[in-house]
Image (tube, rainbow, N blue to C red):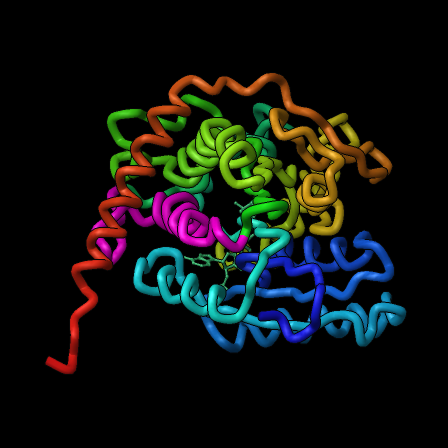
Amino acid sequence: MSLIKDSTVALITGASSNLGFNIAVRLLEQLPQDKDITLIVTSRTLPKAKDSINDIKKFITEKLPQKRGQVEFDYLLVDFTDMVSVLSAYYELSKRYKHLDYFFVNAAQGVYSGIDWVAATVEVFKNPVEAVTSPTYKLQQVGRKSGDGLGLVFQANVFGPYYLIHKLKPLLSNGGKIIWISSLMSQPKYLSFNDLQLVKSPASYEGSKRLVDLLHYGTYKSLKQNYGIESYVVHPGIFTSFSFFQYLNFFTYYGMLVLFYMARWLGSPYHNIEGYIAANAPVAAALGRVKQNEKVGSATTASGKEYLLVEDTIDTTGSSDVVKYLESLAEEWDDKFKDQIVNSRQ
Ligand SMILES: NC(=O)c1ccc[n+]([C@@H]2O[C@H](COP(=O)([O-])OP(=O)(O)OC[C@H]3O[C@@H](n4cnc5c(N)ncnc54)[C@H](OP(=O)(O)O)[C@@H]3O)[C@@H](O)[C@H]2O)c1
């Protein structure tokens, strides 16, 4: 149980990311003043979990001093590409908490091998706005599997979080909210129904985000009806990501930023650039300003004024197939974990 009684409990996966940090701070800014808050950050490593907490504490000291004493921190080490780690996260959370108010599914990864610089240059010259809106020059590895034998990106971005939520339904029931972070890039063309684990796909990251959309649309009504859980799907637009820095040098990083600003000035509503603006839609969804049947994105005007943009109707074809597939895979893992429980005293 949370150490602070009656506090609002929010879990943010991948809180060390630019978006994760900004979801945390925006949530602290916008939750009612009189509410105590427990923030649970997740990371795969202890140093990053500690850094996330320290960064948020620093923000509170500098920008939200009125919140000091009202925020309790907790962390959870979880790697979504490792089912034992996901199951341990569930055990830990159910030992420590009776209820979860918010679950932000923010952690995600791609398996990038670099950038096709020739294709990138051609794209930038042909259509600079498109080149930094729907880039096709980020090279992704094909066929990567996790140690559990599942498609790596599928497990990291879809099945791992899905399985944790599946186990945590009792804690989320009666008012808990799930906020799935999707992407602008989640077009139907990136997902083949013959390859739901995305192992043959050269665009597994985008395919995983399409799965997130379909998963949300295939489950939000039954989650509400059967458990009183509200599910939302949002996207953060485009912003600077810490994880992609490794592929850029000083010149390409600033080159990318110039193109981002150019795209924004030329009318792209999605070039939020800052993580703070990108976190607008996720927090708006959590605080009830978004409809469950709409995919809402964080957007900005040319001058950097944020707003929420409802995406055109999402094509939900195949959502029930995706849900069926995930449900049966979850049952398979429930069984595997049951078989692994042995009586060591015999
Ligand atoms: N950047 C963009 O323009 C953009 C656009 C559309 C959507 N998004 C989405 O926005 C979210 C945040 O993006 P970002 O660019 O800020 O993130 P990021 O810098 O790529 O960081 C991702 C976070 O996810 C965690 N993570 C990665 N793999 C994991 C795994 N296997 N298990 C557990 N945690 C894992 C990492 O935590 P640790 O390293 O601490 O473990 C990290 O904090 C993601 O869902 C992303 O897909 C981003």
Q: Check the image and report above or below for 159 versus 242.
A: above
Residue extending farthest to the bottom is 345
Q: On the rendered image, what quadrant is the C terminus found in?
A: bottom left
Residue 181: image x %, image y %?
56, 42
Q: Going by the image, does 264 lie left or right of 250?
A: right
Residue 201: image x %, image y %?
31, 34
Residue 97: image x %, image y %?
55, 66
Q: Going by the image, does 213 lie left or right of 147?
A: right
Residue extending farthest to the left is 346
Taking the spot 30% from the left edge, 45% from the top edge, the residue there is 330
Asked whether residue 153 is in view, the answer is: no
Residue extending farthest to the right is 66
Q: Name which quarter of the figure residue 284 lies in.
A: top right
Residue 267: image x %, image y %?
76, 26
In reply to whether residue 256 is colored magenta, the answer given is: no
Asked whether residue 342 is in view, the answer is: yes
Taking the spot 82% from the left edge, 32% from the top edge, the residue there is 301
Taking the spot 24% from the left edge, 59% from the top edge, the residue there is 337
Image mark count: 0
Q: Name which quarter of the figure residue 250 lies in.
A: bottom right
**Residue closest to the eye, 324 or 276:** 324
Q: Which residues are magenta?
A: 143-171
Q: Check the image and report above or below for 76 versus 296.
A: below
In reply to whether residue 165 is colored magenta, the answer given is: yes
Q: Name which quarter of the figure residue 198 lies in.
A: top left
Q: On the rendered image, what quadrant is the N terminus found in?
A: bottom right
**Residue closest to the eye, 330 or 315:** 330
Taking the spot 31% from the left edge, 25% from the top edge, the residue there is 192
Q: Main secondary structure of the magenta part?
A: helix
**Residue closest to the eye, 218 or 4:** 4
